[in-house]
Amino acid sequence: MAYLVFPPEFVPEISTVVNWVMSFTPLISYGSTVFSIRKRRSSKGFAIDICSTMLMSATFRIFYYFNDPFEITLLRQCFVMIFIQVILLYNALKFRPQESIKLERYDGHWEDLHDDFIRANSTKIRSDIDQYCRDEYDGRIVFRRIILGSLRVLFNNWGRNLMLLGIFFLKLIGEVLRLFDGHYMRPLRFWQWQASRKYWYFLAFLVATLSVLQYYLHEKEHFGIILGSISFLIESSLPLPQIMLFRRIQTVQNFKTILLLSWLAGDLTKISYLLYGTNNVGMIFIVAAVFQMSLNLVITYLFFKYKRMDWKREQGLLPMSTPKEESSLENLNEIALRDMGSSGMEASSDERIPIRRTSSPLPNIRSGQETMQDLSMSPLRTSGSLFENIRAVSIPAPLQFADSNRNWIPEPVAKIRSRSSTIDEHRTISTSRRSITSTSDSLRDD
């Protein structure tokens, strides 16, 4: 009996296979996000700051390799990461939603905290200053006693000041976190530029700067440590932009499950390597890895929370629009009245009817008596010439119209009046119904 035997040199080791798989894992995790963005033709739900975090972290790590070489597998992974992040950034910018360009200025309300602090201590401090100033001392002693008296007042009022100090640190943390929120304007609008070319200019400038520093400082041991520390610190902040985005839009569109799994697996691998794979590691690296792991656990919770909300929206258990969008529907009647006035039609404000929201699609236009029950039109899409022979028409059914995104939304119906005086005001409502029926037939033919 013959046996097929492979020579040992042709049998790959398990570690070699695992190393090559680890090198190309970014193609799978982030490649699925690229396909999702191209399929939806929108990068809504994906934090574009992830690209900046991974690109800068991988770039610093590559230059760190030239100063302190590490595993070649991790170096290959850095180049693969840069490759897929460039593709992801290109597609995210190409299909970037317009609302992401509109930024708000963050207001930490520091003036209120300052006013509360002054209000809590100014009276007592002023009385102590007056007391010390009444004594006859030279300027140096008076100044010293004023400072000591003010500190005593702050200490005596420690309860109130301790609370204000806690509020101060909370506001300071908020100022730091808002830098990771793409909704608020950052200094110099970093990574929030409207022109796509600025992103590529920044990456080219970063590579050029690190190349110059590497040429002149490659013999400095501390330079390599600084590069490695910056790389780890930048990568540890990776989940923060996505956490901010999840809490704002409350949806997980364009964020794939495999990306979350790759983050969690990467954290476990990194912590295991730092604790058991090497002996020469600083505490800052372990703290950064644990911090990133904790943030990824927060993302995991938010992911399943908003994924369940997305499922409920698809099943009709939750409203499809946000409260802000629904409140904007209340102004549609006013918009319709203004547009009718500009097109030569008029309607009195006391003849408006309440808005009734509905999720039903636009019904088919049929002839006969069913037309008045199912016809859906909008004053925003009509003109004065279309109703030039109608004096007064009353339509009891709610009108609907399609917006720029082809979404059908409800619109209230008011009594439509034209300037034409050719029809007598004493005609019956049956005549008006026959007129609107003929008008609907013409609309269907068009």
Image (cartoon, rainbow, N blue to C red):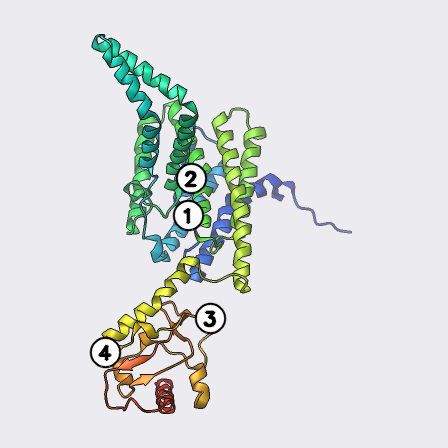
Q: Nearer the viewer, mark 4 or mark 1?
A: 4
Q: Secondary structure at mark 1?
A: helix
Please name the residue shown 48% across and 32% down the image.
288
Left or right: where 180 falls relative to 391:
right
Q: Nearer the viewer, mark 4 or mark 2?
A: 4
Q: Out of 133 and 421, give the one closest to the viewer.
A: 133
**Dot 4 or dot 2, earlier in sequence:** 2
**Dot 1 or dot 2, earlier in sequence:** 2
**Dot 3 or dot 2, earlier in sequence:** 2
**Dot 1 or dot 3, earlier in sequence:** 1
**What amino acid type is highlighted by mark number 2?**
Ala
Instruction: Bin the neighbour count of mark 2 within 10 Å (Cα to Cα): few under 14, some 14-19, many 20 and up.
Output: many
Quick one: quadrant of the C terminus? bottom left
Left or right: where 410 falls relative to 291:
left
Q: Give the CA separation, mark 4 to mark 1.
A: 55 Å
Residue 225 visible, this orientation: no
Q: Do the residues bearing badges 4 and 2 touch, measured as CB atoms within 8 Å?
A: no
**What amino acid type is highlighted by mark number 1?**
Gln
Q: Do the residues bearing badges 1 and 2 touch, measured as CB atoms within 8 Å?
A: yes
Residue at numbered disc 4: 344
